[in-house]
Image: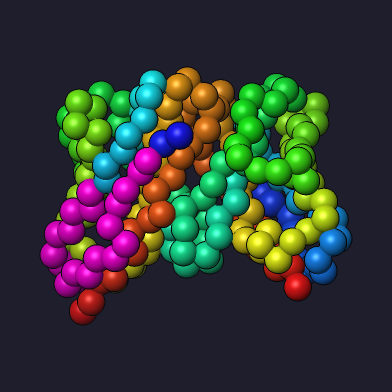
Amino acid sequence: DAGVTQSPTHLIKTRGQHVTLRCSPISGHKSVSWYQQVLGQGPQFIFQYYEKEERGRGNFPDRFSARQFPNYSSELNVNALLLGDSALYLCASSPTGLQGYTFGSGTRLTVV
Amino acid sequence: GQNIDQPTEMTATEGAIVQINCTYQTSGFNGLFWYQQHAGEAPTFLSYNVLDGLEEKGRFSSFLSRSKGYSYLLLKELQMKDSASYLCAVNSNGRDKLSFGAGTTVTVRA
């Protein structure tokens, strides 16, 4: 069985640019969550989607947005990139979003 | 918000036991997770506690006391491959998100 897949694995962007990160959940999982993990810290919650609707949003600026598609895959968009957005972006899926989260390997974003 | 505290680093010898403590302050507690994360990799699920008591899974056990806002992860018969960061995470308020601690880096020495 394929796990949670994320693309791309690594990305380098310039300040001010826009980025789109993609996530495909485990087959049958309807909940997708996004987390930002800065080096040396635990993951910080950004968004959670269930059945294509936003269920939760963390303390991130409006430059961050996300959506979930009918096939339950998801995109995370970040506009006007700042150096501080450099981090590992993790996607997690679960059947309902209440337990049993499985994480993808993440996208390592570097903003220069 | 949630306040989740765990030690930054721990070192132990191969074959030994290590206990990683986690304390939390939250409203509407809905479960506590432990994840293992090797450098540059995704967190992998280790355990889930929602009721008080001990959950045992092979070499790993996790304990929860809701009244004390306290959990620990016990790693027995340590192996070199157990060197990793261990993340404590709390689900609360019925919301579908996890609040993570900063992680405890465990180094296993030969």
| Residue farthest to the right, as pictured | A17
Residue B93 in picture, x, y percent from top left: 45, 22
- Majority SS type along the magenta span: strand
Residue A41 in the magenta stretch? The answer is no
Q: Nearer the viewer, residue B69 or B48?
A: B69
The correct choice, above or below, for B58 with respect to B31 in the image is below
Q: Nearer the viewer, residue B48 or A109?
A: A109
Picture quadrant of residue B1: top left
Picture quadrant of residue A16: bottom right
The correct choice, above or below, for A57 with respect to B110 in the image is above
Q: Quadrant of the C terminus of chain A?
A: bottom right
| Residue farthest to the bottom, as pictured | B110
| Residue farthest to the left, as pictured | B16
The stretch in magenta equals B3-21
Residue B14 in the magenta stretch? The answer is yes
Res. A111 in view: yes
Left or right of B13, for residue A76: right
Left or right of A111, for residue B71: left
- Residue at screen point 74% across, 44% down: A64
Residue B58 in picture, x, y percent from top left: 23, 46
Disc count in the image?
A: 0
Left or right of A85, for residue A63: right
Residue A29 in picture, x, y percent from top left: 62, 30
Image color mode: rainbow
- Residue at screen point 63% across, 33% down: A57
- Residue at screen point 62% across, 28% down: A56
Q: Quadrant of the N terminus of chain A?
A: top right
- Residue at screen point 81% across, 66% down: A15
Res. A2 in view: no
